[in-house]
């Protein structure tokens, strides 16, 4: 009998549409293997789960539901078809999807699920927690200041002086718990700093301010459970001020270079740091680890780990594995195997 794979996609974050595109690519890969029977579950922007029939329509059209098609019911419930799922494949990015919340629900269902568990997901999504854990593991990072809205409002003047003295300008202001560069600003003076903090705290009461570095942006894919493998290294180039939301999601605004042309020792350092970061957050299945390579000094700094990276056919994560010898379809198979292996 086939393995019923529950494909979870859509979701409540700003990365809803990216998730639909990722899920379409994964569904068509899984459908090539007669061992799997894909059962799609679309999660509306308000968090409501939809049954496989309507979810399949969303997958086929590649577009989220229109307002008139939304199910509006204040009570949270799971569609009855959830009972037949043998293994879950959550294809969700951002808060309430990539941050351990959904992983906790799947864990309680006692069925295997693809990718990271509760701890790795929540630590990876929260930049303050992630950086504290990376620092503890000795992974080099940019200087930063962690802050919450209440602390900032108590004494804006002292915090501004502290940030200017320890980080200087330019610096980056970010919501702690987000992705896709949503809520992130690059700031160059006190006035911009205040505006950026007001913006970031509107997304999350916890924020982080980082020293800005001038660096090449490189990414490494990790695959596995206890003995994870690192892929070849990719690089992103663009002409915008930084890799912001528009640059990420407008066709033609950024180029992915695979493999990145780096000195051998830098490639090796990045790969070993990627595996170390993955193990440090207790990763399983997959992650994309992002770095800054400061060419002037030859320094590699870790920026972040993404526990469910973009997974469209054009995304860095599957492209890195394709280059490293694992085509998209095989990559999906491998993730299913890793989920089964972890669940025993
Ligand atoms: P993702 O979509 O990868 O999850 P994210 O929302 O978690 O992104 P970051 O990766 O932290 O955001 O930052 C987004 C981009 O902002 C980086 O790719 C880089 O271009 C720029 N950036 C962030 N922090 C810094 C920094 N300290 N110095 C220089 N550039 C930075
Ligand atoms: Mg991120
Ligand atoms: Mg992300
Ligand atoms: Mg990033």
Image: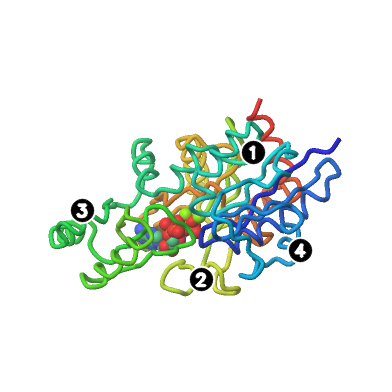
First of labels 4, 1 by sequence position: 4
Residue 147, how many percent across, how many down? 26, 52
Labels 3 and 2 touching (C-beta < 8 A): no
Circle 3 crowding by C-alpha within 10 Å: few under 14, some 14–19, many from 20? few
First of labels 1, 3 by sequence position: 1
Residue 82 vs residue 67: left or right? Answer: right
- Could you give the CA–CA distance between mark 1 and mark 2, rounded to whole angstroms? 32 Å
Observer-nearest of 297 and 277: 277
Report which residue position mark 2 lands on.
247
| Disc 2, SS | helix
| Disc 1, SS | loop
Report which residue position mark 1 lands on.
113
- Could you give the CA–CA distance between mark 4 and mark 2, rounded to whole angstroms? 26 Å
Circle 2 crowding by C-alpha within 10 Å: few under 14, some 14–19, many from 20? many
Report which residue position mark 3 lands on.
151
- Could you give the CA–CA distance between mark 3 and mark 2, rounded to whole angstroms? 32 Å
Circle 1 crowding by C-alpha within 10 Å: few under 14, some 14–19, many from 20? many
Report which residue position mark 4 lands on.
60
| Disc 4, SS | helix
Residue 344, how many percent across, how many down? 66, 25
């Amino acid at each position: 009998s086939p393995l019923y794979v529950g494909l979870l996609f859509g979701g409540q974050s700003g990365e809803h549409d990216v998730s639909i595109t990722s899920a379409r690519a994964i569904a068509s890969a899984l459908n090539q293997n007669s061992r799997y029977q894909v059962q799609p579950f679309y999660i509306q922007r308000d968090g409501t789960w939809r049954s496989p029939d309507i979810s399949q329509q969303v997958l086929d059209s590649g577009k989220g539901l229109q307002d008139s098609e939304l199910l509006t019911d204040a009570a949270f419930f799971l569609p009855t078809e959830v009972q037949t799922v043998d293994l879950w494949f959550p294809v969700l990015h951002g808060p309430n999807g990539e941050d351990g919340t959904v992983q906790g629900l799947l864990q309680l269902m006692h069925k295997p699920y693809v990718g990271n568990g509760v701890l790795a997901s929540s630590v990876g999504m929260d930049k303050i927690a992630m950086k504290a854990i990376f620092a503890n593991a000795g992974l080099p990072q940019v200087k930063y200041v962690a802050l919450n809205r209440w602390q900032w409002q108590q004494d804006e003047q002292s915090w501004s002086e502290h940030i200017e003295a320890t980080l200087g300008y330019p610096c980056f202001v970010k919501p702690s718990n987000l992705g896709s560069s949503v809520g992130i600003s690059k700031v160059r003076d006190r006035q911009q700093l205040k505006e950026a903090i007001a913006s970031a705290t509107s997304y999350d009461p916890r924020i982080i301010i980082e020293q800005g570095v001038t660096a090449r942006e490189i990414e490494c894919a990790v695959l596995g459970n206890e003995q994870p493998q690192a892929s070849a290294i990719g690089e992103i180039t663009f002409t915008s001020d930084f890799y912001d939301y528009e640059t990420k999601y407008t066709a033609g605004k950024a180029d992915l270079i695979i493999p990145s042309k780096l000195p051998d020792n830098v490639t090796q350092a990045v790969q070993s740091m990627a595996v170390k970061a993955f193990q440090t957050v207790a990763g399983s299945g997959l992650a994309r680890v992002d770095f800054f390579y400061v060419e002037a000094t030859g320094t590699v700094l870790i920026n972040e780990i993404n526990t469910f990276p973009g997974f469209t056919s054009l995304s860095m994560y599957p492209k890195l594995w394709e280059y490293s010898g694992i085509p998209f379809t095989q990559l999906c198979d491998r993730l299913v195997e890793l989920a089964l292996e972890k669940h025993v």
